Amino acid sequence: MCLGVPGRIEEVWEADGTRMAIADFGGVRKEVCLAYVPEVEVGDYTIVHVGFALTRLDEASALETLALFREVGLLDDELGPAAGATA
């Protein structure tokens, strides 16, 4: 199953005319493309699906969704075993 997972943008840069970022998904950091959400900045939360940020969302919604995904084990499925670990 492929889910859209909330991630917090930690770093933004441009590569060959495309905005890219590092997103933190509850402890797992991955590179994502910001082409669809040019307004997203460092500190914002966004839903990421297959490496593309799709929409911005508020912090409370993002954290609640991450907690629910972690609780039912979906973060492990999507991001690997380290994602389900508690910090």
Image (cartoon, rainbow, N blue to C red):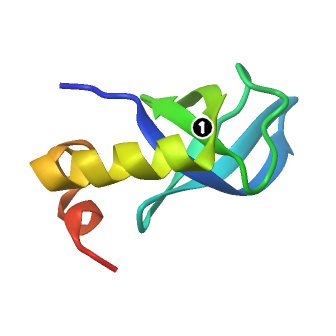
The spot of residue 70 in percent (x, y) is 22, 54
Q: Residue at x 85, y 42 (%)?
A: 14
Q: Is residue 8 above or below residue 17?
A: below
Question: Is residue 51 visible from the viewing direction of this image?
Answer: no
For the point 81% across and 40% down, which residue is it?
A: 15
| Residue at figure coordinates x 41%, y 62% from the top left | 26
Given the image, on which type of amino acid does mark 1 rest?
A: Thr
Question: In the visual, does 75 lie left or right of 27?
Answer: left
Viewport quadrant of the C terminus: bottom left
Place of residue 23 in the rendered image (x, y in percent of width and height, measured from the top left): 58, 53
> Would you identify the image quadrant in which residue 69 lies?
top left
In the foreground, 45 or 54: 45
Q: Which residue is mark 1?
A: 46
Indicate the position of residue 77 as horizontal and vertical percent values.
Answer: 16, 44
| Secondary structure of the residue carrying numbered label 1 | strand
Picture layout, residue 6 above or below residue 3:
below
Instruction: Return the residue found at the far left.
Output: 72
The image quarter containing residue 32 is top right
